[in-house]
Image: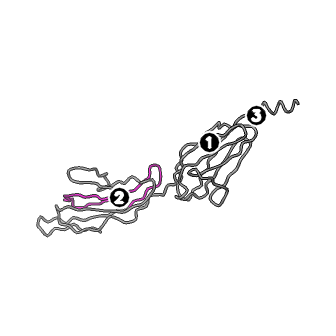
Amino acid sequence: MATDLEERKKERAPEFISNFADTLVMEGMDCKLALSYVGYPQPEVTWLLNRKEISKSDAYDMAVGADEARLTIREARTKLTGDYTCRLRNKFGMTEVVARVTVGVRPELVERPNQLDVTVGDQATFECTYKGFPVPDVFWYHNKRPLTVSSHSVLLSCYDVVVFSSPKLNDLFVHFSCMSAIPSRRSSEVMSSCLVLSCGCLNCWLICY
């Protein structure tokens, strides 16, 4: 009787005593999620991705301790991005927590700025194609100085293509670079250098190499 009474005193619905936050993990890296909990009898632990139950596999490793549930996403791939749920259940109740795991792709410049031949004073448009997730920030530089939108230039970006257009290029030497970066992550950069031959006549050309 005393033992039964002690057991009943320990009985309680499951409850999380720690949480996990939304997480960004780079493609190919492992991602570990861990949660502490209480509950008696020992709760059953279930993991879900986008409300669908997942199980131990090549992609997932799962472990349950006396008071902790752990999920490891092995070599994360973009298709594993989603809302991950940890659910606890025993005969006294059920509880769950949800967090977003985003698998990021390092930025990569797919195509370098285009090659151009234009006369001095004409408009020049440079374009490069990139990829990355989340969508990277893109920066243009002119002679190692950041470019901004002004009366002499316009910068357009649409998904995976960014275009820099300048109506007037009168510098003797013009050096452009396009950098694609995810904040706090490795960035990628390609460069396009241009030589402006200026002799004051209509036969002056901008040569990119």
- Which quadrant is home to the N terminus? top right
Label 1 to label 2, Cα distance in Å? 45 Å
Residue 111 occupies quadrant: bottom left
Tell me the magenta residue range. 162-189
Please tell me whether residue 86 is drawn above or below residue 59 in the rendered image. Answer: above
Residue 96 tag number = 1
Circle 3 sits in a helix, a strand or a loop, which is it?
A: loop
Residue at x 55%, y 45% (from the top left corner): 99
Q: Is residue 110 left or right of residue 122?
A: right
- Front position among marks 1 and 2: 1
Q: Position of residue 45 (x, y in %)?
A: 68, 46
Residue 136 occupies quadrant: bottom left
Please tell me whether residue 200 is drawn above or below residue 86 in the rendered image. Answer: below
Q: Are marks 2 and 3 in contact (CB under 8 Å)?
A: no
Q: Position of residue 97 (x, y in %)?
A: 60, 42
Please tell me whether residue 8 is drawn above or below residue 106 in the rendered image. Answer: above
Residue 202 tag number = none
Residue 163 part of the magenta-drawn span: yes
Label 3 to label 1, Cα distance in Å? 19 Å
Q: Is residue 29 left or right of residue 166?
A: right
**Which one is nearer the viewer's eye here, 48 or 24?**
48
Q: Label 2 belongs to which residue?
A: 178
Quick one: label 3 or label 1, which is nearer the N terminus?
Answer: 3
Quick one: label 1 or label 2, which is nearer the N terminus?
Answer: 1
Residue 11 tag number = 3
Q: Disc 1 marks which amino acid?
A: Glu
Q: Position of residue 36 (x, y in %)?
A: 67, 40
Q: Disc 2 marks which amino acid?
A: Cys
Q: Are marks 3 and 1 in contact (CB under 8 Å)?
A: no
**Which one is nearer the viewer's eye here, 170 or 84?**
84
Q: Is residue 171 left or right of residue 77?
A: left
Q: Disc 3 marks which amino acid?
A: Glu
